[in-house]
Image (cartoon, rainbow, N blue to C red):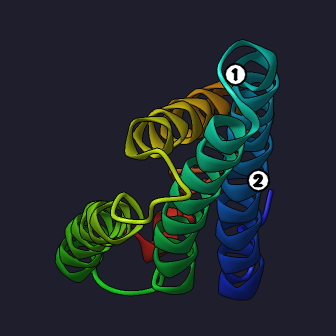
Amino acid sequence: MTEPPPAARNDSLVAAGNKFMIGGSSAAAAATLVGALVVWPIVSGRAAIACVTGGALALLTLALAQAILTATHKLKPGVSMAVAMGAYALTVGCAFGAYLLLKRQEWLPGFWIGMGILMGASGYVLGVAITWPRLRVLVFDPSPPPADEQP
C-alpha cells in the first residue's frame, strides 16, 4: 500500500474542515430558527428577529474561525495552535463586540440577541460534535517505510 501524495493528504484535511463548517453551520441555523419560531408567537416578532440576528452573528464568527483554521492547516503544529487560539479569541471578541453594539439598538431586544447567540453557538458546537465521529482523516502513515530505508 503506497502513501498518498502530500497534496491528497492536504485535500482530505481541507475536506474535513469543510465538513465541520457545514455540520456546524446547519445545526446552528436549525437551532436559531427553531428558537425564533418558538419566540415569535410567545414573546414578539422583534424578539424573534433579535434571536435570528444573534444566531447569525454566532454562526458567522464561528464559521470564520473554522475557515481560518482550515486555511492555515499546513503550518507547523505550534503555529497552528497559536492561530487556533487567536481565531477563537477573535471569535469571542467579535461576538461580544457586536452584541454590545446591537444591544443598544432600540428596535432589537438585547436579551433575545444574547439568546440567539447562545442558541447559534450551542447549535454550532453540537453540529461539529456530531460531524466529528464521521470524519475519516488518517492521522498516521498508512504503511511503514521499507526495511532498507529505515534508520
Closer to the camera: disc 2 or disc 1? Answer: 1
The answer, for residue 151, to whether it is visible in the render is no
**Residue beneath the point at 77% across and 77% down:** 8
**Quarter of the N terminus within the rendering:** bottom right
Q: Viewed as shown, does residue 1 lie left or right of 42?
A: right
Residue annotated with mark 2 = 19
Nearer-the-camera pick, 77 or 70: 70
Give amino acid for label 1.
Val
**Residue beneath the point at 30% across and 63% down:** 88
**What is the spatial separation of the Cα atoms under label 2 and label 1, in whole angstroms?**
30 Å
Residue 105 occupies quadrant:
bottom left
Q: What label sits on residue 22 in the rendered view? A: none
Q: Viewed as shown, does residue 140 lie left or right of 135?
A: left
The answer, for residue 147, to whether it is visible in the render is yes
Nearer-the-camera pick, 52 or 93: 52
| Secondary structure type for disc 2 | helix
Give amino acid for label 2.
Lys
**Residue beneath the point at 80% across and 43% down:** 26
Nearer-the-camera pick, 124 or 11: 124
Where is residue 95 drawn, in percent x and y?
Answer: 36, 62
Of the residues under marks 2 and 1, which one precedes in the sequence? 2
Residue annotated with mark 1 = 39
